[in-house]
Image (spheres, rainbow, N blue to C red):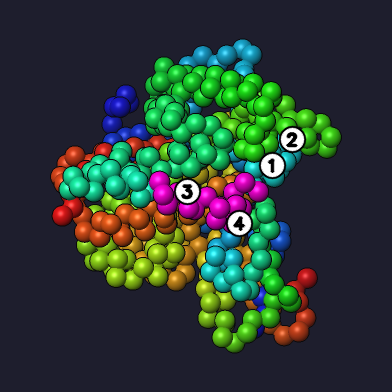
Amino acid sequence: MARTSPVTDWAVDFDVLDQDYVADPFRIWDDLRQRCPIAHTDRRGSTWLPTRYEDVTAIAHDVDHFSSLEVAVIPFDGEEPEDPVLPYGLPPISADPPLHTWTRRLLLPWFSHARVDSYEAMTRDLCISLVDGFLGHGQADAAADYAQQIPVRVIAAILGVSDSHADMFTGWVRDVLEFADDPERRVRGVEGLINYFLEEIEHRRVQPGEDLLSMLLHSEVDGVPVEESVVLGTAALVLIAGVDTTWSAIGSSLWHLATNLDDRKRLVAEPDLMPFAVEELLRAYSPVTMARIVTKDVEYAHCPMRAGDKILMNFPAANRDPEAFEDPDKVVLDRAVNRHVAFGSGIHRCAGSNLARMELRVALEEWLRRIPEFHLTDAAEVTWAGGQVRGPRILPVTFP
Amino acid sequence: MKLRVDPLKCQGHARCFALVPELFDVDEYGMSSVKGDGTVAPALEERARLAVANCPEFAIEEINGAAPAS
């Protein structure tokens, strides 16, 4: 994916797709926080990269200056269609109030604590069957054979679409998020998702079910039926946001446990730590970076931000800020003070955060219950995706 | 000890509810509120402090004395 020239100074010419950044962004953030906490680049348009907790959360809360109308970290550099199928993008994530407010209210009850509890048994059965599939082999790709297989199937069940298409969904989502600098793949992913959901919407017009997609399609807001383009965008969002992200968190957590023997032993010996460990692993390996677009010229922390500039919402770096977390680069499984913003901050807090937490917890519980001892087969084989979502994509592990 | 959730700050991360369900309620939109008048039984004080220390929106306030913050 080396489509751009190497970075010489991260403060003025950063590139989140640079292989050094994808492999180990932590040292780069540490350096930037000390000498230039908000970096800038003109690669892919004028873009700012805050690295401190205080800055990232302040920008997230200032929805007046920093709009969510463009949340893609890598801007699309192909031709935009003249008559877009998704005029509102993927609400509520790509919307500001008021559209954000009512589309979010449609989604939230599907991801409430109570509702997420009802998805737990299905998630656990899924994890058990996946482990059954490779337990006897003594080795597995913890990313591709396990982490990647879980969230996509849970989300498919919630949306009411067949999980037999799981690999196809995963392919489209990766095209959109991980290969965003390749216009051909990005278009393929977007078109695949749109055409698939358009067909599913037609089925549900005739035969509505009890699923999220049917609910969206038959919702009225203030007495007016929700437009099809909003239904389409919201359904696509649920799939895009619910797959790559959580799978990355599960994969990063398993990578951590494969490479940190003491933490793995402790978590196996003290299962009550799991809820705290989940939060700590989310903090230390936050997968998601979002973007905002500057609505009007503003000087923030001595940075002259111009209307149209992009801000990368560097939640992963905020979560490693020593001003906000004691010993931030150390994973402390029972960390007591943990105001991490892995799910964002402010009005765009991840709508699926309860679901993601449950999936990560159950995935780790079921893995550790059956595979308490495991290690990387070969560290050199591990690959990471980065940019909008960071997590391992190839993660071969060996177990007795 | 007495707590209050600032409804203008709460964004539904639900960390407080996950940590101390005895003290907090959460609605179907994820918004948290204290149960009853927010008074914390002495046995729950340590966990209540944990809830305060894990709210990413700094939305949980400790109310000292009888008069709640407006």
Q: Are marks 2 and 1 in contact (CB under 8 Å)?
A: yes
Circles 3, 2 touching at the beta carbon (< 8 Å): no
- The amino acid beneath tag 1 is Leu
Q: Look at label 4 and name its amino acid.
A: Ala
Residue behind mark 3: A122
Mark identifier at residue A106: 1
- Residues at marks 4 and 1 touching, judged by CB atoms closer than 8 Å: no
Residue at (54% x, 65% y) in the render: B18
Residue farthest to the right, as pictured: A223
Determine whether label 4 and label 3 are within 8 Å by CB: no
Which of the marked residues, 3 or 1, is nearer the chain's N terminus? 1
State the separation of the CA atoms marked 2 and 1: 8 Å
The mark lying in front, picked from 2 and 1, is 2
- Does residue A104 belong to the magenta stretch? no
Marks 4 and 1, the one that precedes in the sequence: 1
Residue B35: give x, y in percent of width and height. Answer: 69, 72
Kind of residue at badge 3: Met
Sequence-first tag of 2 and 4: 4
User: Which region shows up in magenta?
Assistant: A109-126
Q: Residue at x 45, y 38 (%)?
A: A152
Which residue is label 2 attached to? A219
Residue A78 appears in the picture as rendered: yes
Asked if labels 1 and 3 touch by Cβ distance under 8 angstroms, the answer is no
Q: CA distance from mark 4 to mark 1?
A: 16 Å
Distance CA(mark 3)–CA(mark 2):
27 Å
